[in-house]
Image: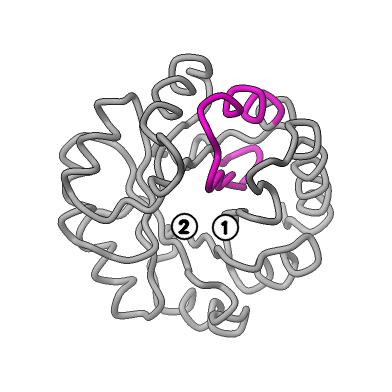
Amino acid sequence: MNALQSALSKVPLVAILRGIRPHEAEAVVHGLGHAGWGVIEVPLNSPQPLQSIAMLAKAFPQLLIGAGTVLHAEQVHEVHKAGGRLVVAPNFNAEVVRAAVDLGIPSVPGVFTPSEAFAALDAGAAALKLFPAEMIPPAAVKAMRAVLPASTMLLPVGGISPGNMASYLAAGANGFGIGSALFTPGKSADEVERAALDFKAALAGTLRV
């Protein structure tokens, strides 16, 4: 079991905190941790993302803190230096995946087709981000699941809500990345925690064990 699988074993949800600022990050992530979420992603197109990652990695060593929107291999090294232990991307870039593998941290590239999925796995991806999920319905996930290795982690991202998680799980998804439905800039830590608990409750009602 890799670090990502371990962190998602209890609550298979990734918090995508796009736009979060360093001064609000600790309170928001404290609430997410309290809600049981174990994987936190700070996209690199957020304000001062490496500062937030460094602070969160130090404050919450029990959580898997990493970066999203990692587009270049040199950014992988910057994230690792800041203390990040996960890199996520909206696309598949073999150099990004290999840089993460070399540093011993999980890489989750974004894929849209089976060809991208197999190429990403060959490069060493720890899981696959199915993005944008609005364009990859459950039927497509089911078709991809049928041909991919059974151990492949599939995480739909984009447009995921408590109401549509059951269909994706039934199709073979392993978990989800949740962005604007969970956090938007200016949202209070209490509001984020309540949304996190709502997602967790919905998941508990639909997850097959």
Residue 143: % across, % down: 50, 83
Kind of residue at disc 2? Met
- Residue, x 41% and y 49% (percent of image)? 45
> From what the image shows, is residue 159 above or below residue 176?
below
Q: Which stretch appears magenta?
A: 8-31
Residue 195: % across, % down: 79, 45
- Residue, x 50% and y 35% (percent of image)? 6
**Which of these two is toward me, 137 or 144?**
137
In the rendered view of the protein, which quadrant contains the N terminus? top left
Q: Is residue 184 magenta?
A: no
What kind of element bears circle 1?
loop
**Which of these two is toward me, 137 or 21?**
21
Q: Which residue is mark 1?
A: 174
| Quarter where residue 170 is shown | bottom right
Tell me the CA gap for discs 2 and 1. 6 Å
Colour logic: one colour
Left or right of residue 182: residue 61: left
Kind of residue at disc 1? Asn
Residue 183: % across, % down: 66, 46
| Quarter where residue 176 is shown | bottom right
**Which of these two is toward me, 156 or 6?**
156
What kind of element bears circle 2?
loop
Pointer 2 or 1: first along the chain: 2
Is the Cβ of the residue at disc 2 closer than 8 Å to that at disc 1? yes
Q: Is residue 21 magenta?
A: yes
Q: Which residue is mark 2?
A: 153
- Residue, x 65% and y 36% (percent of image)? 37
